Amino acid sequence: MDRRIQHHPVLGAIAPGKTLTFQYNGKPYTALHGDTVAAALLAHGVRQLRVHEESGSPRGFYCNIGHCYE
């Protein structure tokens, strides 16, 4: 399921761009040209990337601007 914004209240309809396919944890996903891996995974509902080594709590995206992990 693609959770991308299809119609923005101010910008109007958002035209689909070129797509590509990639795999994450053995599962195929699609991305739009120019997407970061994080944006593509979030668009498909992937929120958890791993679990904490000690507590087992889920870990996901942190800042989403490429400077932080977790």
Image: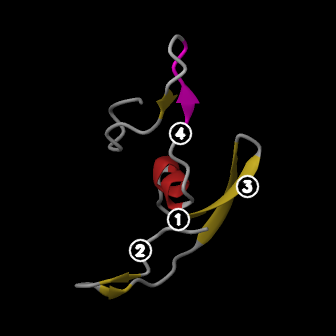
Closer to the camera, 30 or 57? Answer: 57
Q: Position of residue 58 (x, y in %)?
A: 51, 30
Q: Are marks 4 and 3 in contact (CB under 8 Å)?
A: no
- Mark 4 lies on a secondary structure that is loop
Tell me the mark number nearer the camera, choosing from 2 and 4: 4
- Mark 3 lies on a secondary structure that is strand
Amino acid type shown at disc 1: His
Which residue carries the number 2 mark? 5
Tell me the mark number nearer the camera, choosing from 1 and 2: 2
**Label 1 vs label 3: CA separation?**
16 Å
Residue 3 drawn above or below residue 16 = above
Amino acid type shown at disc 4: Gln
Give the label on residue 28, or none.
3
Q: Position of residue 36 (x, y in %)?
A: 47, 51
Q: Which residues are magenta?
A: 49-53
Q: Taken as a whole, is the magenta stretch helix, strand or loop?
A: loop
Q: Residue at coordinates 69% horizontally, 60% vertically from top-left?
A: 21
Which residue carries the number 1 mark? 33
Amino acid type shown at disc 3: Pro
Q: Are marks 4 and 1 in contact (CB under 8 Å)?
A: no
Quarter of the figure that contains the N terminus:
bottom right
**Label 4 vs label 1: CA separation?**
23 Å
Q: Residue at coordinates 45% horizontally, 84% vertically from top-left?
A: 15
